[in-house]
Image: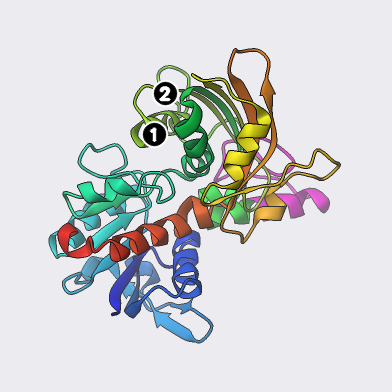
């Protein structure tokens, strides 16, 4: 059986990756629509090796008769069109921040909490923030065994997290520096080339940024409301791939060797931790890969049951497109599509 799938935001970096992922994983489609803003209507995007789709105008697109909508058009756009699609009977899997913290919208990472999909009420499922996704994939198997009490995480997030415009700005600024041209910052608050910026999303009253807040509240919604999370989120001059330095305090005793053994068996996780020069994963290694990679697993001697590790993933794939497609796969496999309509 094939499904009619609409990819909304199809001309953006994540939208294109969703189309690529659907084709690569052989998702059972009978028809695919590429949908985007009026200014992108009429453009062409690729679906698989041979198919080319003409982009349809989101403002006039009729979602009636479409089974699944994979949304990545920006939060304000999803706020308008995701409920419209859901009302037409199209299950929306939304990659924006618009619905993540609404109590009646499941926030899902398939390797972590697929059971949440049985609580679809509004025809909308939310994809978590990219930095949250890779962290909870690594934390989940450890949480099941040792119970996470507190997490302190510093992220090193690539410019693709800010979309194509962020990638273009890093490229343009890097070139400008090499040829001694003026460097201007537009997408980021300061030059990103050869720099790090400890500021992602808006500042909040307590001094944290919204990105840092997202990691805390989303982790609690997915793994448990009693988990404490302190995040520092940094934009770095890397095109693709988010990295995280994670330190965890557990309720139960934990050793580095036990943690490695558990993570090696965990779905979606690859452990590369040889403690040799280069025996760890970097963002350049993970670009184009589906897994969450874990390295540098070691004891944290500053707390009674502490562990630290390094975590890397392709933010456009597992952090966005792949997670959304995996949600669709679970919905189909568990026969939840009609229930969600």
User: How far is disc 2 from disc 1 in space, using C-alphas?
Assistant: 8 Å
Where residue 167 sits in the image (x, y, percent)? 61, 54
The secondary structure that dominates the magenta segment is loop
> Which residue is most to the bottom?
50
> Which residue is most to the right?
277
Label drawn at residue 223: 1
Relative placement, left or right, of 44 versus 240 is: left
Q: By what rule are the colours in the image chosen?
A: rainbow
Place residue 6 in its image quadrant: bottom left
Relative vertical location of residue 56 with respect to residue 247 in this rendering, above or below:
below
Q: Secondary structure at mark 1?
A: helix
Pick the quarter of the image with the C terminus.
bottom left
Residue 191 counted in the magenta span: yes
Q: How many marks?
A: 2
**Over which residues does the magenta segment extend?**
170-196
One can see residue 104 in this view: yes
Label 1 neighbour load within 10 Å: few <14, some 14-19, many 20+: some
Residue at 36% over, 29% down = 224
Place residue 93 in its image quadrant: bottom left
Residue at 38% over, 79% down = 42
Q: Are marks 2 and 1 in contact (CB under 8 Å)?
A: yes
Q: Secondary structure at mark 2?
A: loop
Label 2 neighbour load within 10 Å: few <14, some 14-19, many 20+: some
Pick the quarter of the image with the N terminus.
bottom left
Where residue 280 sits in the image (x, y, percent)? 75, 44
The one of 174 and 13 positioned closer to us in this rendering: 13
Q: Which residue is mark 2?
A: 227
Label drawn at residue 214: none
Residue at 28% over, 75% down = 3
The one of 274 and 314 positioned closer to us in this rendering: 274
Where residue 256 sits in the image (x, y, percent)? 67, 30
One can see residue 172 in this view: no
């Amino acid at each position: 059986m094939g499904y009619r799938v609409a990819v909304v935001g199809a001309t953006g970096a994540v939208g294109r990756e969703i189309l690529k992922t659907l084709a690569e994983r052989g998702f059972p489609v009978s028809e695919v629509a590429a949908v985007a803003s009026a200014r992108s209507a009429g453009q062409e995007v690729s679906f698989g090796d041979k198919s080319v789709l003409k982009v349809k105008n989101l403002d006039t697109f009729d979602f009636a008769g479409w089974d699944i909508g994979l949304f990545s058009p920006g939060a304000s756009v999803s706020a308008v069109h995701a409920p419209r699609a859901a009302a037409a009977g199209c299950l929306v899997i939304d990659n924006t921040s618009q619905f993540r913290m609404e109590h009646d919208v499941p926030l899902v990472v398939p390797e972590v909490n697929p059971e949440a999909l049985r609580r679809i009420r509004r025809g909308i499922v939310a994809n978590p923030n990219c930095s949250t996704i890779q962290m909870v994939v690594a934390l989940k198997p450890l949480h099941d065994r040792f119970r996470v009490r507190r997490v302190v995480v510093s992220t090193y997030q690539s410019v693709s997290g800010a979309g194509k415009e962020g990638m273009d700005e890093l490229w343009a600024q890097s070139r400008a520096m090499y040829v001694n041209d003026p460097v201007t910052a537009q997408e980021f608050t300061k030059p990103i080339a050869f720099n790090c910026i400890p500021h992602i999303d808006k500042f909040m009253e307590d001094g944290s940024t919204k990105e840092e807040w997202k990691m805390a509240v989303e982790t609690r919604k997915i793994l448990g409301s009693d988990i404490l999370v302190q995040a520092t989120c940094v934009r770095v001059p890397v095109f693709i791939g988010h990295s995280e330095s994670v330190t965890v305090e557990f309720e139960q005793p934990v050793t580095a060797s036990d943690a490695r053994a558990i993570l090696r068996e965990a779905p979606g996780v690859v452990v590369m931790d040889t403690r040799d020069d280069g025996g760890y994963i970097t963002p350049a290694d993970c670009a184009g890969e589906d897994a969450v990679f874990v390295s540098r697993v070691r004891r944290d001697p500053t707390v009674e049951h502490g562990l630290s590790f390094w975590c890397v993933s392709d933010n456009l794939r597992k952090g966005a497109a792949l997670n959304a497609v995996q949600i669709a796969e679970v919905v189909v496999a568990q026969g939840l599509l009609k229930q969600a309509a």
